[in-house]
Amino acid sequence: MSQALRPNTAGSLFATDGRRRPLQDTLMAATLVLGVLSFVTSFFHGLHLLSSWAGLAGLLTGAYGQWVSETTRERFGLILGLGASGVGFLIGMAHGGLFGGLVG
């Protein structure tokens, strides 16, 4: 009957153990936003600078987030953001790269 005394955290979006983790939540959200930005802008050839830089920033943010993450939910969101950032970064690099069109 001890389960009746435990808080129900199964429905929690960010923490599975009931503790607050603002750094990890912020890193996860930033990685997801940068990943979506990089992935969506990679479909437009002229936005390769935005796509590649957002992808690179998402990869770095996500890598640090993985290093400090403590729960499975954080890692799941980080992996989604890392995947989208990686795809957007690579397509942005294929379309012109980080400095394409700016260097003589």
Image (spheres, helix red, strand yellow):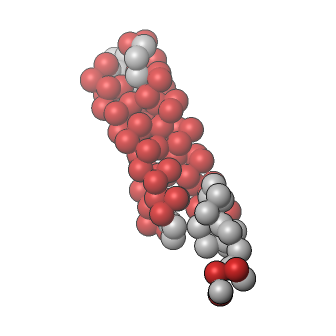
Q: Nearer the viewer, residue 69 or 8?
A: 8
Q: In this rendering, is residue 96 above or below 7?
A: above
Would residue 64 be seen by someone viewing this image from the given angle? no
Q: Residue at x 44, y 66 (%)?
A: 67
Extreme residue in the left direction? 94
Extreme residue in the bottom direction? 2
Location of residue 51 in the rendering, given as x and y in whole percent from the top left corner = 44, 27
Q: In this rendering, is residue 18 above or below 23?
A: below
Location of residue 1 in the rendering, given as x and y in whole percent from the top left corner = 65, 86
Quadrant (top left, top right, bottom left, bottom right) of the C terminus = top left
Residue 98 quadrant: top left
Q: Residue at x 52, y 30 (%)?
A: 37
Location of residue 26 in the rendering, given as x and y in whole percent from the top left corner = 63, 54
Q: In this rendering, is residue 75 above or below 1?
A: above
**Count of picture labels:** 0
Q: Nearer the viewer, residue 62 or 94?
A: 62
Q: Residue at x 38, y 13 (%)?
A: 45
Q: Nearer the viewer, residue 93 or 91?
A: 91
Q: Is residue 27 left or right of residue 60?
A: right
Residue 55 quadrant: top left
Q: In this rendering, is residue 34 above or below 29?
A: above
